[in-house]
Image (tube, rainbow, N blue to C red):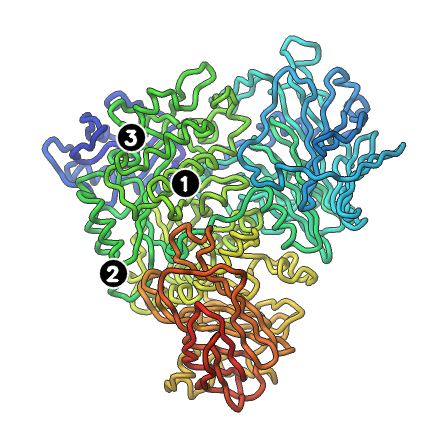
Amino acid sequence: DRSLRSSSRGSLSASKIGFPLASSPLQPGIGSSLLFLQPPPGPSLLRSSTVKGLSLAPPLRPASLPMTPRRKTAGSVFTPARIAFLAGMSSLLCLTMAFKAEEFRYCKDSSFCRRHRAFDGTKEEATYSLSEVKMLDDNTVQGELHNLMDKDRPLKLTIAVFSNGVFRVTVDELKGIKPRYHVQDVLIGEVVSKPVKGELSLSADKATVTFGGRTLELALAPGPFKAVFKLDGETVLSLNSRNLLKFEVYRDKGEEGALEDITGINDGLWEESFKAHRDSRPHGPASVGIDVDFEGVEHVYGLSERASRFSLPNTKGEGVARDEPYRLYNLDVFEYAVSDDRAHQALYGSVPLMLSHTAGKSGGMLFLNGAEMYVDVEDGEKMKRTHWFSESGVMDLFLMAAKTPTEVQGQYAQLVGTQFMPPLFALGYHQCRWNYKDEADVREVDAKFDEHDIPYDVLWLDIEHTIGKRYMTWDRHLFPNPEQMQQDLASRGRKTVVIIDPHLKVDSQYAVYSEAKRQGFFVKNKDGKDFEGHCWPGGSSWLDYLSAEVRDYWASRFLPTNYAGSTEHLYTWNDMNEPSVFNGPEITMQKDLLHHGDIEHRDVHNLYGYYMTMATQAGQQLVRPGRRPFILSRAFFAGSQRYAAVWTGDNMAEWSHLQAATPMLLQLSMTGIQFCGADVGGFFGNPEPELLVRWYQAAAYTPFFRGHAHIDTKRREPWLFGDAVTAQVRSALRARYRVLPYIYSLFHRAHATGTPILRPLWMEFPADTNTFGTDDAFMLGSALLVKPVAAPNTKTTDVYLPAGTNWYPFKAGLYKDVSEGDAPAKKGLMGRLFGGKDSGSKGIAHAGGATVNVECGIDDGIPVFQRAGSIVPARERARRGTAAMMADPYTVHVALDEGGSASGELYIDDGDSMDYAKGDYDHFALSMAGKELSYTRVGSSKYTGGHVTKLERVVVYGIAAAPASVSCTPEGGAKAGVEFTYDKEAQVLVLRNPGVAMNQAWKISF
């Protein structure tokens, strides 16, 4: 998150390498040798230096300085002159920072990538054939794959079918000289643990495995080996149709052929270097690859995380922006680029899932492998052709197909798990900065939100709150009473989040490090010694989270007895967990490091952050038994949604990055990482007020909503830009809080079924081909279409409204005026919604299947439309945060379809505990049919705690005439009349104070 590099990558400041700028009263376990870092004379800040045993040599990354010096004490060397010197150096470094392509490897730098791209499938001796196919007692189908080149090294093909229709195809060595790594702890649940019995039929020319009355079929051609996956007789995808299956079996270095590859690319087989780093590669080449064709489609999606269009651009063929495959390799990428020619660039997390869709057919494939991976995409005849290759491990492919994309998402969720159910506060607004410098700063920021009547829920602290970047400590000069600070925020319903990175400072007096060192819990180098590298504290070691024992240790460190200054109101931000190693290759770990069980880091690199968040969640559960955790992580893998929210990392205060946020979040959401967001305003740089406001307006409708900024940026709290900007940001934040009941209900559905919260338009309109390439707008759930404004000086914008339904402008909070008789209501809704434009004969409804031009001046906000046939629950009273809203009444927005019907749902629980897992929640279906709106309990669950809230207002769109009367009947109660107001021109009916409770069923009749 705070990656800073100049061209020398050798500059450091005191703030970044972990030396406090003043003496600190020491906490238990913290040594007393904390000194000031004196700036060397002249320009030698760019040279190698040594301070108290810490070598500050290139290639350490530079970093900027704190905005103000900390309290001066005896012995301080930070005179005004020195501060001025270092501040000048900081400014100089900031001028040189930018994305440095040369710091990262590309296919040309990776021998296994070059070998697979050069392999064309034409050599007979490398062609695999299938034999010995049989059904085993465990319901799996097994066969052997042979080729002439490795005739004594057959591969084992295993096919398993699961009850949800997913086919698993695994290729491993049958009798390898060394076991190959299989990803652990990602697959979850009974579906994948118990294969069902498919039907196996054998003939002379193929073997066929079918499931579901032949609805799903995998046809296996024996030679050359090929597998075709079909849904209802129509091919969804095919494996090895181009004969690109290449499996590098483990060999002894001295055996015949061990030093040669069939492609003739023989360099890098047994060792490889990148810049000054050497990968010893002790087990030789072990990469695996195969081609996969997605048939009958023009678009494929997925392969998060990358800053590219949502529909993945081609990497090969005519017109490509860059002939470079997509790379999946978790990296700390500084100021990443968002142009098409950088779409291949690996970022902070990896989900090796690709999705395909066309009308009537959706598909997907998960390549479950934790090593570095590349994927090529190109056009074929009525298909997308892809080529996947990973540096090590096995081929573990999960094939998915269904009629709709929603069903495919459900299949995927049953493999790797669903979105964790977050505490309600986590869906509010999060205010973060590197760094709020002390307790007084925290108090002032918190008070200013209330002073300006701006809601927020969480205040965050970055690395400067610690003693010298020793995580789980507090600098007591800056934060003398962190417990009281957290309690004070909590008294107003607010929480605190602090950063905890995986690198632990090498310091025998630092208890978190020293105890881990004593127990041998760190990642090892290839010689079996504790690995040491450089990160924010200077010399650091990294816990080996792949070990269950290490994860238990990490969890125990969150207990208040170990983590002084923590309270139950403190939550966690896991950053730098790709992992980021400043002096490592590509700013990460060497691949030949060793994990628990002598597993090479190359096998599990993309899993490191996943395991860290698993351990952090366990720690939060120890601290708060029976309550929900909240963790934010930068690195992730398939299944990370079970443990953490994710953000898009070190973005920039540029319009292009705001524009890129929507496709990036769509990509994350559709690969299971559903609690996601982008830093509002951009992490690097100073956003102009218009950009900042537009970012708030867009992010208000994304699952994770946080403002964050770099330490060298100007302060950008909402009240610092004048009254107009303050009001615009306040409006955007209030829009978020109004729809929280709807968003919270979406999170419940995501948790229960795996259905994404933020969705591409084609997920809801799978037959509308106009939506397949759309990524400048998104659906929030099934009801709301959101079109961010991502260009300056925008007064109007075009919005495509999908076909098959009508659409209503969604202006939650506006209709309060209508029922309460305020003067603005007398002007009519038409002018207020459309700026005086004629909307046609259907009131405020727009017909779908067309592009409309919508007014969207900065005071108007961004376009948001409600889909006809949907119901959106809301809470429309302005509050300081989610805790203050718990007893507030509800407003229900009902958008009628052509038949006068609509449906929706509302989920209610205590917003914090795990009691919902025991059935302690309310789940109600909302349905409008005929002339009756009903509110009916779903299932037998019942919420037993908290406030009994009321229904305050119902807004009905698209009702052609005013009703003669309206009545409301609660379950088991008497019918009562309801006040209403009708706007004939807008065709909007507003019911005021029906007065029924939201914890029981009721109906409203018109």
Image coordinates for residue 818, horizontal then vertical, percent:
43, 83
Image coordinates for residue 244, horizontal then vertical, percent:
74, 31
> Looking at the image, can residue 273 be seen?
yes
Image coordinates for residue 499, horizontal then vertical, percent:
34, 41
> How many residues crowd mark 3 within 10 Å: few (<14), some (14–19), many (20+)?
some
> How many residues crowd mark 1 within 10 Å: few (<14), some (14–19), many (20+)?
many
Please identify the quarter of the rendering in which residue 125 is found: top right
Residue drawn at 77 percent across, 29 percent down: 121
Q: CA distance from mark 3 to mark 1?
A: 40 Å
Establish if 543 lies above or below 683.
above
Which mark's residue is nearer the viewer, 1 or 2? 1
Whichever of callouts 3 and 1 sits on the residue coming sooner in the sequence is 3
Q: Residue furthest right?
A: 204
Which mark's residue is nearer the viewer, 3 or 2? 2
Q: CA distance from mark 1 to mark 2?
A: 32 Å
Q: Answer with left or right where residue 602 lies relative to residue 168.
A: left
Image coordinates for residue 11, horizontal then vertical, percent:
33, 32
Establish if 268 lies above or below 442.
above
> How many residues crowd mark 2 within 10 Å: few (<14), some (14–19), many (20+)?
some
Q: Answer with left or right where residue 989 lies relative to residue 119.
A: left
Between 641 and 24, the one nearer to me in the picture: 641
Given contact means CB atoms under 8 Å apart, are the residues at marks 3 and 1 in contact?
A: no
Q: CA distance from mark 3 to mark 2?
A: 39 Å
Numbered circle sitting on residue 448: 2
Look at mark 1 in the image and give the residue it sits on: 617
Whichever of callouts 3 and 2 sits on the residue coming sooner in the sequence is 3
Q: Amino acid at mark 1?
A: Gln
Which mark's residue is nearer the viewer, 3 or 1? 1
Whichever of callouts 1 and 2 sits on the residue coming sooner in the sequence is 2
Look at mark 3 in the image and give the residue it sits on: 45
Judged from the image, the secondary structure of the residue bearing numbered disc 1 is helix
